[in-house]
Amino acid sequence: MDFFSVLSMIGGLALFLFGMHVLGEGLAKVSGGRLEKILETLTSNIFKAVLLGAGVTAVIQSSSATTVMAVGFVNSGIMKLEQAVGIIMGANVGTTATSWILSLTGIEGESFLIQMLKPSSFSPILAIIGVFMMLFSKKEKKQDIGSILVGFAVLMTGMDAMSAAVKPLADVPEFTSILTAFSNPFLGMIAGTILTAVIQSSSASVGILQALCMTGAVTYGSALPIIMGQNIGTCVTALLSAIGAKKNAQRTACMHLYFNLIGTVVFMVGFYLINGFVHFSFLAESANPAGIAVVHSLFNIGATLLWLPFNKYLVKLACLTVRDKEEDKEEANQMLQLLDARFLDSPSLAIEHCKRVSNHMAELVKEAMSTSIQLLTNYDEAAAERVVEIENIVDAYEDGLGTYLVKVGSRHLSEKDSHTCSILLQCIGDFERISDHALNIMESAQEVHDKGLAFSPKAQNELAVFQKAVSDILDKTVSVFKTEDMKGAEEIEPLEEVIDYLRAELKKRHVKRLRKGKCTIEMGFVLSDVTTNCERVSDHCSNIAVSIIQILQDGYDTHEYLENMKSEDNQQFTEEYKAYKKMYQLP
């Protein structure tokens, strides 16, 4: 084997790994986060969990990705440890799908149909279709499908290149002697573990083994322990992802390790004990890609059937390994756990989690604003403390979301996810400021209560109308934000203008009462603080609505948009403004 053959083999390996990466990424993007959502909604049914884990892994072509996803779900509190064990078992079964696809390279026959079943025959066709879809289609989904087809074609091209490069090794005695050394079960298992740990993909390492089998120099006796080691090596990715994670996430990674480690030990001990008496003749035969796929599948299905009745013991074993400490306390804020770095490799899922946290943040802001308004007429210390608590939580949400969204935004996002990411980045600051204004209103209510002050009945009635308009604009804004409803967003600005009008009118009426001696200057300061904060809330609602429209329309000048909206020529705005003004008439 000369230098150029080695170069061809390395090039083939590079194409193989790159093709697998492109294929997996394309499948994940086309799924749009739906596969991950299925995992999120798992029940405690272990059989359903196994089937779903197998199905998802077969689709995304990576048991490591599915297992890391499970670690992330457990870490964020979405999934329980008992649910994750089924996912892990299923992932090991699903990963065998790749080896079966790759085994098609070994199909023999002269008929046209059989020849077309060989990946080397249909891969070029898929590549041509994929390239045309990527270059000439304007729809992102079709481009992603094209990348899947191209990824598969590149993967199979790499496989063929590796097979062709290593084929001459069959006649090299030194190479044959190395492979013979792997017939020692322990050495073979170590070799398989190291290979898979380095490239962090059991599917890829099995594919490399299948390529080596094309030389005819690899026997089943050599291949069997390597396959066993590959199943242990694939645990490295999950173990690395659990570093620094919470206890249950670390236990999930341990379950993956124990599933494969104990399964391998049981299989190896059982198989070689039986072999000591029966002496399996096939161990001396040359392995082929289909045979490798059979062994890989038999082990993973067998290990799953072995562990299935004892899945609770697998959980207990993981809990014994990673013990709880007495001083460990449960996270106070469950929602922020959704912003897990492990989900960044699935951007659509990461965006979905950001949306969930942002929606919860918006609902908390609504609660804070509603509570603070009620405190003006019915002060309660516990409710006031709740407003303070919400303000602190919202501050934490803004910090956590801002940092996480910047990281997500640097990944390759679909057009819809990109819009959502931009909307969230622009709007979370406005929601945080609304919670600040709610806190200010609460402090005004506290001042009124502590000093024994009270608004006049007339002022209370006027303030009630004003506050109703502010509550309504916030409700509308939160609804528009959660649904990204551009039409609903256009209805926010007319109401914001009415709130500006109402604030000016309240100030004017207060001055009249002050002149007549029906109100005090001190209460005038409180009224000014309250109406100013409420008016600022409506401003932030306007900002959120304009941001949504701006992003969904792919950008425009904000000031120009507002000027055009409020112009006399805009009949729709004028009609909506008049309708809101009539709805919120002061008594």
Image (cartoon, grey):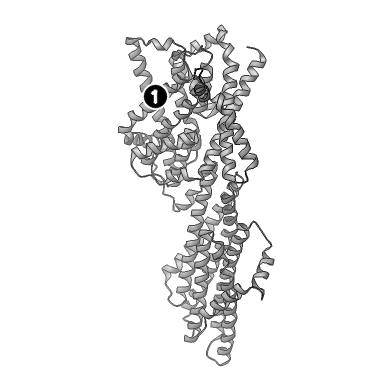
Residue 108's x, y, as percent?
49, 17
Above or below 3: residue 321 = below
Above or below 246: residue 573 = below
> What residue do we see at 64% from left, 20% from top?
8
> What residue do we see at 67% from left, 69% from top?
564
Does residue 387 appear anywhere in the picture? no
Residue 515's x, y, as percent?
58, 91
**In the image, farthest residue toward the front:** 112
> What residue do we see at 54% from left, 26% from top?
198
Question: What amino acid is at disc 1?
Answer: Phe
Above or below 585: residue 387 = above
Q: Would residue 523 be found to the left or right of residue 296 on screen?
A: right
Front-most of 450 and 540? 540
Front-most of 198 and 114? 114
| Quadrant location, the N terminus | top right
Residue 193's x, y, as percent?
48, 23
Q: Secondary structure at mark 1?
A: helix
Front-most of 393 and 102? 102
Residue 83's x, y, as percent?
37, 41
Tally the numbered discs: 1
Front-most of 515 and 358? 358
Q: How many residues crowd mark 1 within 10 Å: few (<14), some (14–19), many (20+)?
A: many
Above or below 452: residue 429 = above
Pointer 1: what residue? Answer: 299
Task: Specify the quadrant of the image occupied by residue 259.
Answer: top left
Does residue 12 appear anywhere in the picture? yes
